Image (tube, rainbow, N blue to C red):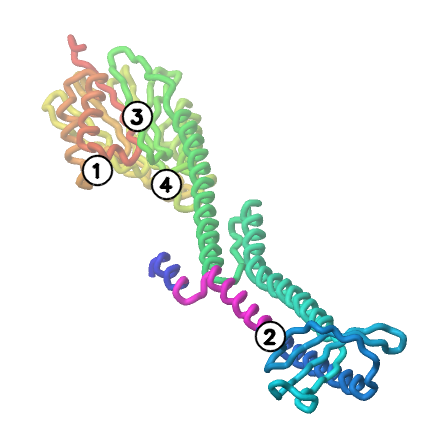
Amino acid sequence: MKPGGREGDLRIRVLGLKARFALAMTAALAVVMGLTAFLLSAASSQIVENATNEALAGAARLMHKQPPIEAETQGWAGPQGVQVFPFHYEEDGTRRDGRIYRHETGTPPGPLDRFDLLAPAGGRGGGAMLRVIVGTFAALLAVGALVSVWVASSVSRPVETLIDDVRQMAKGDLRHRTRARGPGEIQLLARALDRMASELEEGEASKLELAVRERELDLASGVRDALMPAGTPLIEGYDLGAAFLASPRFGGDFHDFVQRSDGTCGLLVCDVSGRGVPAALIGSTARAYLRGELERPGEVADAFKRVNRWLARDVRRGMFVSALYALLDPAAGRATVACAGHKIPLLRVCATDGQLRVVQPEGIALGFDKGPVFDRRLQVVEVPLEPGDRLVLANSAPVRIQNDEGQELGEKAFYARVKRHNAADTTQFLRALRRDLEQFAGAAGFQEDVSLVTVSRPAAGGA
């Protein structure tokens, strides 16, 4: 279910904050007002009854004592035809007020048709009623204040809890989740905060991952730059060159030129398993070992065997380095070739017949075996380099280049392009080969780093 749908259901099922507040206040006021009305009614009835009894008792007392009175001649009409006249009398040395309630039946009334009722004026009923009203108002105010505090607390408590949750999240604890419970709006706000914290946590994780990735990229790029040869040797009568086509998926593949003190020069291309910083570090280690051994005079096979033993000791299981090496002897016009599990063979384009031949001596990758199997399988062959011939060494990336449709270039197509541009000098040859590879890859670009090393022996009178 979509989050929006769930929030909509929540609004329908649960009373909102406004409705809950209004309902609570209305119910509380209804209870308070009903209780107030009941108390006022009971108190008023009692006060009226007490005032009536007091008035009747006073009237009985005055009618019995018949004290001297000073009656006023002016009065007013009371209810049901009764005339009311004020009068004054003395009682216990105190001047008091009273009322004469006169009822006459005759027209004109005679002495027997008139009845006078003497009653004291006023009474304590008014004061009692005032006290009841004031007390009831005070009680109503107190109860209303308590109800308001209760309702405000029930509303503010979840809000305060949410504020504490937000403070916790603001301190950086994005794993914290809200604990507020309450009306629909509070729950919706709590869910929104939880969702925001979750998204911020994911954003922080992505940011950290990106930062780590960028650091890895910087490190691997630095290692990759360090793996590149400082320059291309100049050998009289031969044209050497190399090209490195970088890709976003950096690894440890590299190529190098290894010059010996006896005038020979080695051409080296290596594939390293894996990608990223680990592959770059293994490539750097393998390059250091290979350069250190291949620069020394001696047999190529012995150098490879020593490097294999050291590398097998240093790399973890499953990691390896494949290598294709051609030691060029300019004076003899030949190359000594060794292959340590390299997938792409040495390519030789012969000037005599224009054909392309592959040279791939047997051997397993460096680091797979600590010695016995590697030493037994390793083979070294001699390859002539006649005037007009070209040797090409490459890692496996060129044949795995994919175009926009996901089709790989393949070995045959790569070999055909090498053969097509063979007649050009080395600079133009590498430029044309690079252009062909980029055109095939198209917008997809290279998925792996491409290493190319070549040497040609120009024919007499050639460039």
Circle 1 residue: 402
Q: Main secondary structure of the magenta part?
A: helix
Q: Quadrant of residue 436?
A: top left
Residue sitting farthest toward the left: 353
Q: Secondary structure at mark 1?
A: loop
Report how many numbered discs are placed on residues in the image. Answer: 4
Q: Which disc, if any, is residue 146?
A: none
Indicate which disc, 3 or 4, sits on the residue closer to the N terminus. Answer: 3
Q: Nearer the viewer, residue 51 or 46?
A: 51
Q: Which disc, if any, is residue 274?
A: 4
Circle 3 residue: 244
Residue sitting farthest toward the right: 93
Q: CA distance from mark 3 to mark 4?
A: 18 Å
Residue sitting farthest toward the bottom: 112
Inspect the image, locate mark 3, and give the three-letter code of the amino acid beneath it: Phe
Inspect the image, locate mark 4, and give the three-letter code of the amino acid beneath it: Gly
Q: CA distance from mark 4 to mark 1?
A: 19 Å
The location of residue 198, given as percent across then percent down, is 46, 51
Horizontal relation, residue 47 to residue 318: left or right: right
Q: Secondary structure at mark 2?
A: helix
Inspect the image, locate mark 2, and give the three-letter code of the amino acid beneath it: Ala
Indicate which disc, 4 or 1, sits on the residue closer to the N terminus. Answer: 4
Indicate which disc, 1 or 2, sits on the residue closer to the N terminus. Answer: 2
Q: Which disc, if any, is residue 37?
A: 2
